[in-house]
Image (cartoon, rainbow, N blue to C red):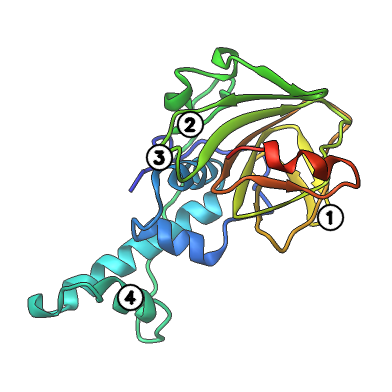
Amino acid sequence: MMEPLDHFQAAAMAPSHHPTEDLLLAYAAGGLDEAMSLVVATHLALCPHCRAEVTRLEAVGGALIDDLAPAALGAGTLDAVLARLDEPNIDPIPLPVARRRPAGPAPVLPEPLRSYIGGDIDRIGWSRTIPGLEEADIICGDRRRSRVRMMRIRGGMGMPRHTHHGNELTLVLAGGFADETGHFLRGDLAVTDPSIDHRPVADDDGDCICLAVTDAPLRLTGRFLRLLNPFLRL
């Protein structure tokens, strides 16, 4: 499981949109692949609430495994541990106290993402995809299973209306965007799937920079753009 390297770096305002409970459970249990772990770990670097929740889940899961007899450890152990996490007889675990952040400007990219990029935002080599959108692929995990990329959307620009053949996690790192599901700012995580048909629009006050992970191609739903669907790639 990938751990966030900079545990106490956070935005001035706590994020409002978080990973689902299932995602946090899977992350704490080491059940996510490298690509999904990267976006969740980067969110944790910006979200004290989810960071504390993952710490609690890891501690509770570890305590429950310690209580299991050695003979009980097997293929079904993880399912048994996750099923017991909400039992009322588990003592609450104190949440960690955040340390003081070092003085000086914080980088735009928190760890662990910064290590994948090889530095901060100025190290990204952007390529124009469509007018108003630039992207940069990140080598992370198995490209046959998922695609990881940075996205920079020009302020005020809207993306083509689309839905998803699979799942997409989009983490805002600078600026913001809004769609039919809400308004997303730095540290917010948008979780979308085939049930969501949306058109993200970047805020007017600057570029929106995001980290996005998809496990299947998008599906354009606009009247004319849907003709391009056969050419889309993961």
Q: How many C-alpha atoms fall within 10 Å of the one at disc 4: few (<14), some, or many (≥20)?
A: few
* The label number, if any, that marks residue 142 in the structure image: 3
Residue 186 horizontal/vertical position (percent): 68, 38
How far separated are the C-alphas under marks 2 and 4? 30 Å
Determine which residue is flagged by label 1: 180
> Reading the chain from its start, which is encountered first: label 2 or label 4?
4
The three-letter amino acid code for the residue at tag 3 is Asp
Determine which residue is flagged by label 2: 113
How far separated are the C-alphas under marks 3 and 1? 31 Å
* The label number, if any, that marks residue 15 in the structure image: none
- Observer-nearest residue: 183 or 88? 183
Q: Is residue 200 visible?
A: no
Q: How many C-alpha atoms fall within 10 Å of the one at disc 3: few (<14), some, or many (≥20)?
A: few
**Residue 132 sits in which quadrant?**
top right
Q: In this view, does 65 lie to the left or right of 126?
A: left
> In percent of the image, x 57 and y 62: which residue is there?
20
**Element at badge 2?**
helix
